[in-house]
Amino acid sequence: MQSPSFVFVLLIMLIIGVTISIHSRKSTTPRKCQHCGSLKMEQISHETLNTKTVNLHENGFLPGADIRLEIEQDLTYRCQVCNRRTTFRITHTP
């Protein structure tokens, strides 16, 4: 029979694995069709408009500072209900 500590360690590893799996998936904001209000949108294209570096500490570019790339994109979606196209402009820092 397995010892209780082995089962406990196995359970903790399972919980950590599930947590990492959930958080590592790409989270996207559901897009709503501006014409019919449907949430059944399919991304058909994306275009990067601008990129720039940003410092998250706002103290200038110091050694060891948290510097990220800010990306501005146009995302084009097609509604699967009314078949119209909608473009959303987003800015994100990966």
Image: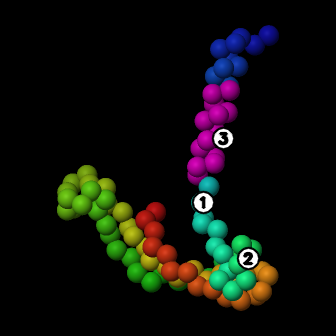
Q: Are marks 2 and 3 in contact (CB under 8 Å)?
A: no
Residue 7: x and y, percent?
A: 70, 19
Question: Which residue is at a point 25% across and 52% down the rendered structure image?
Answer: 64
- The residue singled out by tag 1 in the image is 26
Height in image: 55 above or below 76? above
Does residue 54 appear to the left or right of 73 in the view shown?
Answer: left
Amino acid bearing label 3: Val
Height in image: 64 above or below 17? below
Question: Which residue is at a point 71% across and 72% down the rendered structure image?
Answer: 39
Residue 42 visible in rendering? no
Instruction: Choose the circle earlier in sequence order: 1 or 3.
Output: 3
Residue 29: x and y, percent?
A: 60, 66
Does residue 6 appear to the left or right of 72 in the view shown?
Answer: right
Amino acid bearing label 2: Ser
- The residue singled out by tag 2 in the image is 38
**Real-space Cα separation, disc 1 to disc 3, in angstroms:** 15 Å
Residue count near mark 1 (Cα–Cα under 10 Å), binned few <14, some 14–19, many ≥20: few
Amino acid bearing label 1: Lys
Q: Nearer the viewer, residue 73 or 80?
A: 80
- The residue singled out by tag 3 in the image is 18
